Image (tube, rainbow, N blue to C red):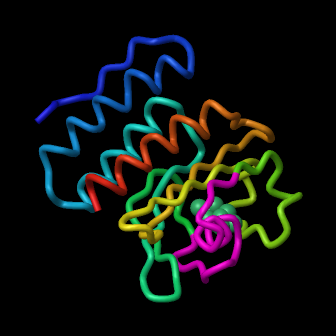
Amino acid sequence: MAESILIEANTKSEKYKQLIPQLQSLCISESNLIANLANVSAALKSTFHFFWVGFYLVENESLVLGPFQGPIACTRIAFGKGVCGTAWKNEKAILVMNVDEFPGHIACSSESKSEIVIPIIKNNAVVAVLDVDSDEIGHFDQDDMNYLTELCTWLGQSCF
Ligand code: SME
């Protein structure tokens, strides 16, 4: 198993390009889902210094808090509620530039200002979402969307 993640790039895109293959080789050598999601959230947090990064796992009609890095967060989110529940319901990623402008946004922390949520799909069903929060308005862009979607597509097919 890799002992550490090595990121030498300066730009965000280059960091994602270096990080994703290292996460894939890290996860492929471990069969436990929670261990893998814990390492993915830690690696994303330490590479990009996001305010909060973590997973919510589908359990019946709710999303339940899974491995994450950052301040404590809401433990359950109902189907269709908040950004996470909406991404689950729509089976589609959501980029929120300003959380105050997203109707029904669930504020686990008043410090979170922008957010991106990517559904993780296995066998055509959402099994989890990746939620990343920033303490800056408009922090995320299409590059985050594309690379995090690539990572979540792989996680759904290979880790769940
Ligand atoms: N803001 C999310 C809730 C989860 S926390 O941000 C960690 C939402 O509206 O679904």
Residue in the picture at 31% in, 29% down: 21
33 vs 108, left or right, is: left
33 vs 46, left or right, is: left
Asked which quadrant contains residue 108, the reply is bottom right
Residue 146, can we see it? yes
Please check the rendered image and state whether residue 117 is part of the magenta-colored stretch, yes or no: no
Q: Position of residue 132 (x, y in %)?
A: 58, 49
When the figure is inspected, residue 55 is found, relative to residue 58, above or below; the finding is above
When the figure is inspected, residue 90 is found, relative to residue 44, above or below; the finding is below
Asked which quadrant contains residue 2, the reply is top left
- Nearer to the camera, 132 or 91: 91
Residue in the picture at 79% in, 38% down: 138
Residue in the picture at 42% in, 82% down: 59
Number of numbered markers: 0
Residue in the picture at 12% in, 44% down: 29
- Nearer to the camera, 18 or 158: 158
Residue interval drawn in magenta = 74-94
Please check the rendered image and state whether residue 90 is part of the magenta-colored stretch, yes or no: yes
Picture quarter with the C terminus: bottom left
Residue 108, can we see it? no
- Nearer to the camera, 122 or 17: 122
The quarter of the image that holds ligand 1 is bottom right
30 vs 121, left or right, is: left
Q: Position of residue 80 (x, y in %)?
A: 67, 78
Picture quarter with the N terminus: top left
When the figure is inspected, residue 32 is found, relative to residue 30, above or below; the finding is below
Q: Residue furthest right?
A: 101
Q: Position of residue 64 (x, y in %)?
A: 46, 76
Q: Residue furthest bottom?
A: 60
When the figure is inspected, residue 38 is found, relative to residue 138, above or below; the finding is below
